[in-house]
Amino acid sequence: MMLLWSTSSIQSPAISRKHRIRSFFTRAPVEARGNITPKRNRSALETRVSLVLALASQASALTQQVLSELVVETTKYAFPRTFEARNLEEVLMSVPDLETIKYCILKRTDQYEIREVEPYYIAETAMPGKTGFDFNGASQGFNVLAEYLFGKNTISEQMEMTTPVITRKVQSDSKKMDMTTPVITKRESSGDKWKMSFVMPSKYGANLPLPKDPTVRITEVPRKIVAVTAFSGFVTDEDVKHRELELRKYLRSDPEFQVINDASVEVAQFNPPFTLPFTRRNELALEVERNSD
């Protein structure tokens, strides 16, 4: 009897170890792993809160990037560039620190300067109106070109703004495209049709994205020589006519350069609309050539 009790109540060391190992893996997680709590499913509210926090974090990062870019762009207007002044009027003029076309000065007088302008590319479109400075017509043309510049093209490329904006009129049979950045407006004498053009950022060269709008056309402007006079204020058609006549008069007395046949006047406007009139810089230009004498 004593023997039977002993064999049924006392287990061997091997059986005891197996039992302890089996008991360890079958216990509840709290007992087996100390203070580690079991994983539970998130509630719908917790999931939504997590999503909102993630979106808020992403939006914050995006906002910081946008603000950084805004600061950079604002700086270009807050700390403008100035040209070498020939008179008191030009001393007060300033322009945004944006890309503009490249040129070298060949000659300077009290009334004008002669520049050799390097080639550049433009995007142009027709605009309504019978004057070069009609607000409604200019606004429509500007909006069409701005859409192209800011992504309405075949690769959705957003391009940088340049300066200045140029309005110009040409003879109907003229194919030349004169100095400007980034906007040119030209008039064809037959029917008083005007065209507005943006000068494209130079980094693209000839590899500009194609416009989606069929009314927008990309053109290369060749190298040229122009006579330029600067003035301040807001531009009007009457003001342009008067200043063009004055510039032509001065150039008739120039011993080195003369206005080319059928040259069309163009007016460059460098500043955004909110700029004070007396600090605005405008330039009126005529294409010239060297005298053959």
Image (cartoon, rainbow, N blue to C red):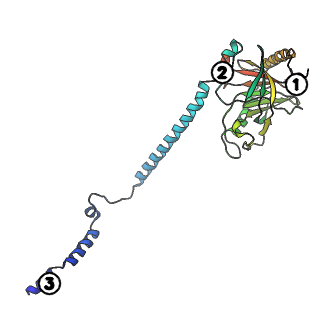
Asked if the residues shown at circle 1 and circle 2 are in contact, with their CB atoms under 8 angstroms apart, the answer is: no
**Height in image: 141 above or below 25?**
above
**What secondary structure is marked by label 1?**
loop
**Height in image: 114 above or below 20?**
above
Which badge, 3 or 2, comes first in the chain's sequence?
3
In front of the other: 108 or 87: 108
**What secondary structure is marked by label 3?**
helix
Residue sitting at the far front:
293
Relative image position of residue 151 (x, y in whole percent): 67, 42
Q: Amino acid at mark 3?
A: Thr
Asked if the residues shown at circle 1 and circle 3 are in contact, with their CB atoms under 8 angstroms apart, the answer is: no
Report whether 231 appears left or right of 8: right
Q: State the CA–CA distance, disc 1 to disc 2.
A: 30 Å
Relative image position of residue 57 (x, y in whole percent): 47, 44
Q: What is the crowding at mark 3: few (fewer than 14 residues within 10 Å), some, or many (at least 20)?
A: few
Which badge, 1 or 2, comes first in the chain's sequence?
2
Q: What is the crowding at mark 2: few (fewer than 14 residues within 10 Å), some, or many (at least 20)?
A: some
Quadrant assignment, res 29: bottom left
Numbered tag placed on residue 260 in the rendering: 1
Q: State the CA–CA distance, disc 3 to disc 2.
A: 108 Å
The quadrant of the image that shows the C terminus is top right
Label 3, on which residue? Answer: 7
Between tags 3 and 2, which lies in front? 2
**Height in image: 231 above or below 225?**
above
Numbered tag placed on residue 82 in the rendering: 2
Tell me what residue is drawn at x 89 percent, y 26 percent: 262
Q: Amino acid at mark 1?
A: Ile
Relative image position of residue 99 (x, y in whole percent): 67, 31
Tell me what residue is drawn at x 79 percent, y 38 percent: 219
